Image: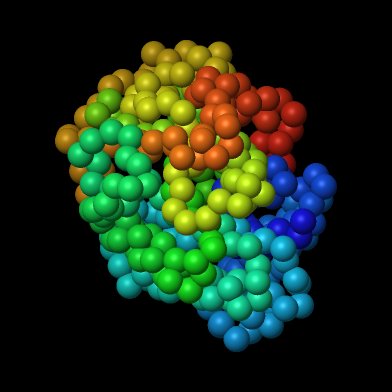
């Protein structure tokens, strides 16, 4: 397949490309930041100029678009809500309209932040209740995509993996802190269902091939607190965890409100594929293997 990934210079875009480059023609769609990855090609995209973007798609002829571009900093979105909606909602609609017009399969990446976090393991049938500008903009992006491209697969998730320089994931940040022997305060009252970015890519690819469409939760199999995640990450990498301390979200001073429980039920995806995504320790072991194989250094470079 020829796969075009928007946000190709970001953490998810690069991990997705690395997971898909064997046997596929992968295009890294870039905008303001450059990116290079062996076995892929970089292309500058004019997503903010709809007519030009449609012409680019006609020239590239991708079989599938993975729309991974977005403004993902929750606090930045809260400070600049107009920018958040322009990037996370309006541009999502532009990509979806172009994909629909040219008959290109579309995967749109959304977030687990769209829920209020008042309970655990949200399903696709639960009504979203966004608490901040980031979540509202991403939910509006989901709606924009569904309105113009009904066959799109809209993926709600929460991922981690090796990030490029300047774009750390939660695992990058924790590992850097552990190695520096810095004190890390991790919330014991915030829960999520994290999935390794490369596992997310291969799982979504399988769902596309199975004909999945609409909103689908594709995340990890285990609901864990941020504190528990950090301890298991330390164990997986053989690092001492004595600098990790428990903290409470209620005591944090953050610019934007956040859901306390972002965990997602992935039963529908599991049913469609006939198997789960694997346990968290399995994902952490694969993260470690990616470092040993040199992939982490490649992505950071």
Reply above or below: 224 against 148: above
Q: Nearer the viewer, residue 24 or 125?
A: 125
Asked which quadrant contains residue 77, the reply is bottom left
Asked which quadrant contains residue 299, the reply is top right
Q: Residue furthest bottom?
A: 51
Q: Position of residue 131 (x, y in %)?
A: 23, 53
Left or right of residue 296, residue 67 in this image? left
The residue that appears at 66% across and 36% down in the rendered structure is 296
Q: Position of residue 229 (x, y in %)?
A: 42, 25
Left or right of residue 209, residue 148 in this image? left
Question: Looking at the rendering, in which quadrant would you find the N terminus?
Answer: bottom right
Q: Nearer the viewer, residue 277 or 74?
A: 277
The residue that appears at 33% across and 48% down in the rendered structure is 125
Q: Position of residue 276 (x, y in %)?
A: 54, 29
How is this picture coloured?
Answer: rainbow
Left or right of residue 104, residue 196 in this image? left
Q: Position of residue 36 (x, y in %)?
A: 73, 55
Reply above or below: 214 against 235: below
Left or right of residue 165, residue 298 in this image? right
The residue that appears at 50% across and 14% down in the rendered structure is 235
> Can you see residue 161?
no
Reply above or below: 228 against 187: above
The residue that appears at 33% across and 27% down in the rendered structure is 225
Q: Residue furthest left?
A: 250
> Can you see residue 99?
yes
Q: How many marks?
A: 0
């Amino acid at each position: 397949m020829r796969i075009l990934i928007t946000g190709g210079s970001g953490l998810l875009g690069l991990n997705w490309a690395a997971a898909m480059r064997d046997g596929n023609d992968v295009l890294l769609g870039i905008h303001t930041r450059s990116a290079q990855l062996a076995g892929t090609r970089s292309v500058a995209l004019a997503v903010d100029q709809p007519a030009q973007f449609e012409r680019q798609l006609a020239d590239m002829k991708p079989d599938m678009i993975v729309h991974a571009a977005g403004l993902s900093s929750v606090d930045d979105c809260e400070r600049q809500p107009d920018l958040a909606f322009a990037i996370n909602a309006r541009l999502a609609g532009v990509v979806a309209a172009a994909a629909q017009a040219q008959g290109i399969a579309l995967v749109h990446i959304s977030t687990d932040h769209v829920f209020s976090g008042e309970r655990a393991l949200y399903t696709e049938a639960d009504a979203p209740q966004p608490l901040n500008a980031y979540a509202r903009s991403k939910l509006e992006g989901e709606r924009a995509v569904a309105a113009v491209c009904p066959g799109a697969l809209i993926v709600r998730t929460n991922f981690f993996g090796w990030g490029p320089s300047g774009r750390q994931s939660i695992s990058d940040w924790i590992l850097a802190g552990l190695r520096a022997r810095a004190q890390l305060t991790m919330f014991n009252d915030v829960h999520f269902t994290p999935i390794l970015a490369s596992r997310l890519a291969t799982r979504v690819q399988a769902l596309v091939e199975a004909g999945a469409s609409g909103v689908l939760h594709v995340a990890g199999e285990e609901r864990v607190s941020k504190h528990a995640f950090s301890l298991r990450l330390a164990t997986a990498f053989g690092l001492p965890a004595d600098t990790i301390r428990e903290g409470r979200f209620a005591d944090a001073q953050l610019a934007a409100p956040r859901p306390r429980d972002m965990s997602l039920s992935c039963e529908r995806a599991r049913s469609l594929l006939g198997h789960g995504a694997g346990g968290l320790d399995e994902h952490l072991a694969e993260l470690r293997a990616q470092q040993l194989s040199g992939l982490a250094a490649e992505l950071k470079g």
